[in-house]
Image: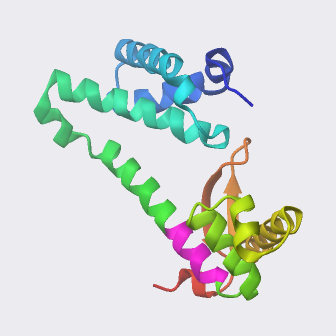
Amino acid sequence: MKQNTTELWIRFADSLRRFIHSKVKNDVLTDDLLQETFIRIHSKIDTLQDDTRVQSWVYQIARNIIYDHFRKSNPESIAEMPEVEDAKHEQDEAMTNTVRDMVLLMEDLPEQDCQALCRVEFEGMSIREFAEKTGISYTAAKSRVARARNKLSDLLMNCCHYEFDRYGTVISYHPIKCCCCHQQ
């Protein structure tokens, strides 16, 4: 589904306003930065490659606008703004942990399923290429990859409790039982 700026405004304007205000603590500046955020969203919407990641894309643009504002207005004030870098660091750390957990849990999958996920998800091989390299039909390869994704999803859901926003994006997660994915 291709996104448009009006839909994104309806979906994110209020939460972005609160997010920006929490960083700049000024109503007029908040509105200016919100407007600038949506101008950039509008001009860059064609660069959005994955509609399922639209929320993180929108918030990253807002973070960049806030960061640019502080950098332009007073380069020393960036040091006073650790929450922008902290938010990026937390997002990067959560992504790193999730990928690490998935890789560890993949060891519990049957060899064929693990191989299918590794080739398609991590090595970037298309399903058609995977089918050719393994000597199976395209339909069989598609089924194998889908089955492997479902099995991995089940393993993750049995290991952790996930909290989702109303759009299905993971907000947070925590272990519900001891499993290998949370060992350091």
Q: In the rendered view, would you say 177 is above or below 65? A: below
Residue at the spot 69% in from the left edge and 20% down from the top edge:
7
Residue 9 higher or lower than 153, as above or below: above
Q: Is residue 159 visible?
A: no
Q: Is residue 56 left or right of residue 22?
A: right
x and y, in percent, of residue 93 in the image: 43, 62
Query: Residue 38, position in %: x, y?
Result: 50, 18
Residues in magenta, as a range: 97-106
- Picture quadrant of residue 173: bottom right
129, 11: nearer the viewer: 129
Q: State the scheme by which the image is colored.
A: rainbow
Image coords of residue 99 (percent x, y): 54, 68
Rendered-image quadrant of the C terminus = bottom left
Q: Residue at x 61, y 42 (%)?
A: 53
Percent coordinates x, y for residue 145 in the rendering: 77, 67
Q: Nearer the viewer, residue 16 or 155?
A: 155
Is residue 143 depicted above or below 110 in this figure? above
Residue 170 counted in the magenta span: no
Give the overall secondary structure of the magenta segment.
helix
Q: Residue at x 83, y 73 (%)?
A: 136
Residue at the image point whose x is 23% and y is 28% from the top: 70
Q: Is 156 rendered above or below residue 173? A: below
Whether residue 173 sits left or right of residue 134 in the image: it is left
